[in-house]
Image (cartoon, rainbow, N blue to C red):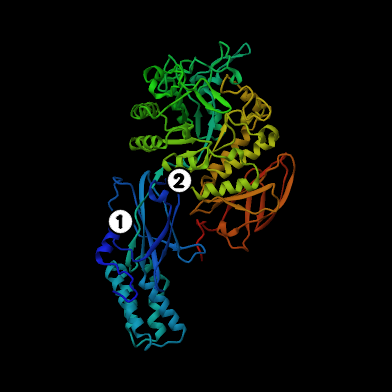
Amino acid sequence: MPATGAKVLARADLDSVEAMTGRANLRLGITDVHPVVSCGAFSARAVVGEHLPVTATVFREGHDAVAANVVWEPPAGSGSTTPPPLIRMAKYGLEPDRWLATVVPDREGCWTFRIEAWSDPLATWRHAVEVKVEAGQGPEELANDLEEGARLLDRVAAEAPERDREAVAAAAAALRDTSLELTSRIAPALTPTLQQYVHDHPVRELITRSPSYEVWVDRPRALYGSWYEFFPRSEGPVVGGIPTHGTFANAQERLPAIADMGFDVVYLPPIHPIGTVNRKGRNNTLSPEPHDVGSPWAIGSAEGGHDAVHPQLGTMDDFKAFVARTRELGMEVALDFALQAAPDHPWVQSNPEWFTTKPDGTIAYAENPPKKYQDIYPINFDNDPEGIYAETLRVIRVWIEAGVRIFRVDNPHTKPLNFWHWLIWEVKKTDPDVLFLAEAFTRPAMMHQLARIGFTQSYTYFTWRTQRAELEDYGRELAQNAHYMRPNFFVNTPDILHESLQFGGPPMFKIRAVLASMMSPSWGVYSGFELFEHVAVRPGSEEYLDSEKYQLRPRDWAGAEASGRSLAPYLRRLNEIRRAHPALQQLRTLRFHPVDNPNLICFSKTDPGSTDAVIVVVNLSSHHTQIGTTALDLTALGLDWHERFGVTDELTGAHYDWGQFNYLELDPYREPAHIFGVAFPRPVQFPPPVP
């Protein structure tokens, strides 16, 4: 026992550590691995083709050099038989022990990665020799160092293919050749070519491995897309001044215009039979007229439930034809999935235990005080979870079979988290390309946990972020959590008409569209936005007057565009810009830049591995011209502080020569934003490594 009395770990104790950690060799330190979600309890997220930064803190005792690599393995059963390549990590950032590598998945499914840290004797040797030579030491003092280097190169040569072995062996021989001058003995081992070879084929000692972590890789639509929401029932003809209920056939006629605006996803509210009991009338009244159509979210009647199509819209075959036409136009359908029931839904009769019965024997309807939803019964998961789980999965698969690959889930935060975790991953077992968007305007903790457990995207607080500071803070939060939470910035919804749109005039509609489409790789528009619809049902409300949730609302699309009273051409241009610039299809690379006017916001995005970048400046005031000067963080763009570069305004076509400081003047009535396309002379990396 040492004199200090300190306990010495016995072999059995070390075996216990291994049993607890599953790691036999903890020789080097590996901490703060990223991307990891909840200590590895859930999968991190990426999409096919996305550059995913993998980082870790790697260190060891003493002064010997350490290095690290990522072992990046494709999904099991993907057909790959070759061992994963050695993906070297490089130091980056200001912390001396922080390391980075970028991996790019090329297929969907569950990938895994782990960090390998190791002692790098060749780097240690090179540093020692260079320092000693610089200090004036001669061949006699360096004899052991030279032989040590030769032996290390012997190890490299022994593993090298024949075409490379000769150069490595020659460098080892030179180190041993006492007839040469010292610099001539060392020089062959330090040539850029040989150093690159030993970098790619290192001698690794004391290899220490982290646990393996999962990354679920989705198709690209999980990250990037432009959504357009509309009600098919409002697309019927107006006869004698009276709107008639639209069908899927009528709604197909609207699809070319949506595609022409550059949207990728057509999102439909629920298309199921609507309850007649407690049906709501116009503007959410409790006294409907006989012709009132009710809320699509009051699902179910004697005509069917969640697996049925509203008869006035058509048949299941009509819906499938609508889906097929959407695909022909280069788009896809997202269908609302609202797990709730109208009082006359078939479930209420067949499974009353799926709902909450109050002491007086009545079933509780949904409430979100002061709002009341007398036409909707929430699901109670506590009485028969097994039955509810099975029925929900059956319903989802009905619509998957009909061609739906995206579900916009209504109010998921009011259902158990373990239910969603089970449902999403049960679906992905058979249909890994199916995506789920969480409509969860709720507390941050719940929104983030829904993303962690499997939701592909999430609605966000963007609608209520209007000032520069709060937009910047929120944008940074989302970019930092891009490894599991993907936002979808909707500028409006049938439920949300923000006061900025009510009182900001047409320029504010442009401002919000630019912010949403440029900041987030996924964004959305609810129909009517392009017609500047802005009247609330009452002062202080975010509900639309004559809300389409409760009535048919046909619109004169062609007339508005022909008369210049439509924002459709502007939305088309924004989506064209998004498609032309891969940088705008990213979230992780969002960076904000200082401007000396709080009413101006400036941000950039880059596309890792390419030369594409975009810089956006927006006037947040819809009523007044704003002037200011940027102070761009050029390092975030992969540039040196002195560099200048050309920019092209994608909205006006104007060209400018830019640097760090740039004067701006934006008149909201002419054009409230600059969207500058930038073509850099060299690929941009993310994050920028330390030189």
Of 116 and 153, the residue lying toward us = 116
Residue tagged 1: 20
Q: Residues within 10 Å of mark 1 (few under 14, many from 20)?
A: few
Single out the residue that lies furthest toward the left: 12
Is residue 165 shown to the viewer in this render? yes
> Disc 1 vs disc 2: Cβ atoms closer than 8 Å?
no
Q: Secondary structure at mark 1?
A: helix
Residue at left offset 40%, top offset 85%: 182
Up/down of 402 relative to 167, above or below: above
Q: Residues within 10 Å of mark 2 (few under 14, many from 20)?
A: many
Up/down of 227 relative to 164, above or below: above
Distance from disc 1 to disc 2, alpha carbons, whole Å, reads 27 Å
Q: Amino acid at mark 1?
A: Met
Of 122 and 95, the residue lying toward us = 95
Residue at left offset 53%, top offset 34%: 227
Up/down of 644 relative to 664, above or below: below
Single out the residue that lies furthest toward the right: 624
